Amino acid sequence: MIASDLRSRAPSFFRFPRPEPGIWGKWLRRRAMKRLLDLDDHMLDDIGVTREEVETAAAMPLSVNAAVELHRTALERRRAGR
């Protein structure tokens, strides 16, 4: 049985409005990216990003793909040799 079948058979008090998939997915990915802040600076360095880059990307609006921006800023920093 698939989830949509279960939802249609659920009592009305279990039927919640579903958030827009795009926003929901972006929010989940952003929350997962913020977990990088739980790592210490040496681990972040092994990944190739700095704490400041992660914090900046995490603070961006959901309309921006923060993972792409994090990758772009880390790549620019490495190319500049900083």
Image (tube, rainbow, N blue to C red):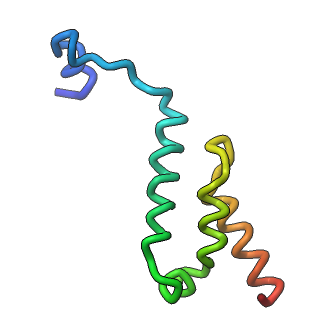
Up the image or down, 37 lies above or below 45; here it is above
Side (left or right) of 6 relative to 73? left
Q: Residue furthest top?
A: 12
Residue 6 location, x and y as percent? Answer: 19, 21
Q: In percent of the image, x 17 and y 15: which residue is there?
A: 10
Up the image or down, 32 lies above or below 5; here it is below
Front position in the image: 75 or 33? 33
Residue 57 is drawn in which quadrant? bottom right
Q: In percent of the image, x 24 and y 28: which residue is there?
A: 3
Side (left or right) of 20 relative to 5? right
Up the image or down, 17 lies above or below 73; here it is above
Front position in the image: 51 or 7? 51
Up the image or down, 4 lies above or below 39; here it is above
**Image mark count:** 0
Residue 70 location, x and y as percent? Answer: 66, 65
Residue 35 is drawn in which quadrant? bottom left
Residue 28 location, x and y as percent? Answer: 45, 47
Q: Quadrant of the C terminus?
A: bottom right
Residue 71 is drawn in which quadrant? bottom right
Q: In percent of the image, x 48 and y 84: which residue is there?
A: 43
Residue 67 location, x and y as percent? Answer: 61, 59
Side (left or right) of 66 relative to 5? right
Q: In percent of the image, x 61 and y 65: which residue is there?
A: 55
Front position in the image: 40 or 82? 40
Q: Residue furthest right?
A: 80
Q: Quadrant of the N terminus?
A: top left
